[in-house]
Amino acid sequence: MLLFNIILLIHFICFAVYLCTLLSQWQDYNTRVRGPLGFILGMIVLLTGIAMVALKYPHVNYYKVVPKTGLFIVVTIINARFGGKVYTRGAYYALIAITLLAACIAVVRV
């Protein structure tokens, strides 16, 4: 249980830092080129998510895992599309909305 809680804490911190990096671009999202931090945080979130599912298997709450995985794929597609370029307004707001939706899915009890 301690291992799961440590992985969950790492997952939460990386997710929060990713959200903060998105929100820090609020004023200049259309001029700032992204660095490698988002990719690194995304990989850590993905790996810790997989580790948490592996530790909880077979008692996995698929009502949360499947939608959050789908949202992660959409974020990955948006980031791959704008790799090395600045975000458009729609892409930037979509990333924020998807990130907040994933956070809401994580805290809602089903």
Image (tube, helix red, strand yellow):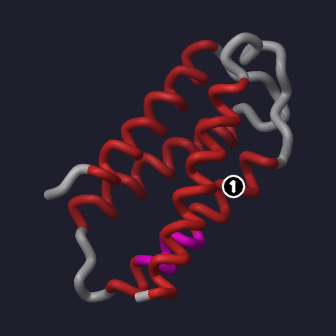
Q: Position of residue 51 (x, y in %)?
A: 50, 80
| Quadrant of the rendered image containing residue 22 | top right
Label 1: few (<14), some (14–19) or many (≥20) C-alpha neighbours in 10 Å: some
Q: Which residues are magenta?
A: 47-52
Residue shown at 59% from the left, 43% from the top: 77
Question: Considering the image in quadrants, where does the C terminus appear?
Answer: bottom left
Q: Position of residue 61 (x, y in %)?
A: 23, 70
Residue shown at 72% from the left, 22% from the top: 25
- Report the magenta stretch's main SS: helix
Answer with left or right where residue 101 lies relative to residue 7: left
- Looking at the picture, does residue 7 appear above or below residue 80? below
- Looking at the picture, does residue 60 appear above or below residue 102? below
In this figure, which residue is indicated by the disc labeled 1? Answer: 41
Residue shown at 54% from the left, 75% from the top: 7
Q: Position of residue 36 (x, y in %)?
A: 83, 47
| Quadrant of the rendered image containing residue 98 | top left
Element at label 1: helix
- Relative to the observer, which residue lies in front, 85 or 108? 108
Answer with left or right where residue 67 lies relative to residue 34: left
Under mark 1, the amino acid is Leu
On whether residue 76 falls in the magenta region, the answer is no
| Quadrant of the rendered image containing residue 109 | bottom left
On whether residue 51 falls in the magenta region, the answer is yes
- Relative to the observer, which residue lies in front, 63 or 104? 104
Q: Residue furthest front?
A: 2
- Relative to the observer, which residue lies in front, 29 or 8? 8
Residue shown at 24% from the left, 67% from the top: 62
- Relative to the observer, which residue lies in front, 44 or 1? 1
Question: Considering the image in quadrants, where does the N terminus appear?
Answer: bottom left
Answer with left or right where residue 86 lies relative to residue 97: right
- Looking at the picture, does residue 69 appear above or below residue 6? above
Q: Position of residue 32 (x, y in %)?
A: 83, 21
